[in-house]
Amino acid sequence: MDHFDLFRFFRFWLGWVVAVYASIVTAQSLWQTWQSLTGRDRYMTMLRQYLLVHGLRLRFRAFWGDVLICVLLGVAFVLLVHAQTMMDRIEEAMPAQSVPQ
């Protein structure tokens, strides 16, 4: 172990913790929504029908701007990850040189 980068270590583990946390919270939220919508009382039936009708009326052209922003943010993320991997490869390929004085 000739070089240990604390920032890279922190970034790697923070990414894992955030990804696991977001997955758990999303799964819990979806499960609670599913449980509440599967009720058999009158109001839950009306709510299911309301959600179904509005889901069918949804116009995707109204959301093209949001979709475009999400796609561009995804592209920016992929570019940043690719740039970081390229920088890591350059750092590994170049030998450590001391600065002459």
Image (cartoon, rainbow, N blue to C red):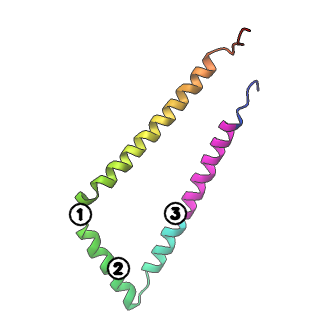
Kindly report the distance in space between the C-alpha atoms of the residues bearing marks 3 and 1.
25 Å
Say whether marks 2 and 1 touch (CB < 8 Å). Answer: no
Front position among marks 2 and 1? 1
Quick one: SS at disc 3?
A: helix
4 with respect to 17 (left or right): right
Res. 56 image quadrant: bottom left
Marks 2/1: CA distance?
A: 19 Å
Local crowd at mark 3 within 10 Å, few (<14), some, or many (≥20)?
A: few
Q: Position of residue 11 (x, y in %)?
A: 63, 42
Residue found 45% across the figure and 74% down from its top? 34
Question: Which residue position holds label 2?
Answer: 48
Q: Which residue is mark 3?
A: 26
Look at 30% across and 80% down and name the residue there.
49
Give the quarter of the image for residue 1. Answer: top right
Does 34 appear in magenta?
no
Q: Which residues are magenta?
A: 7-27
Above or below, 11 against 58 in this view is above
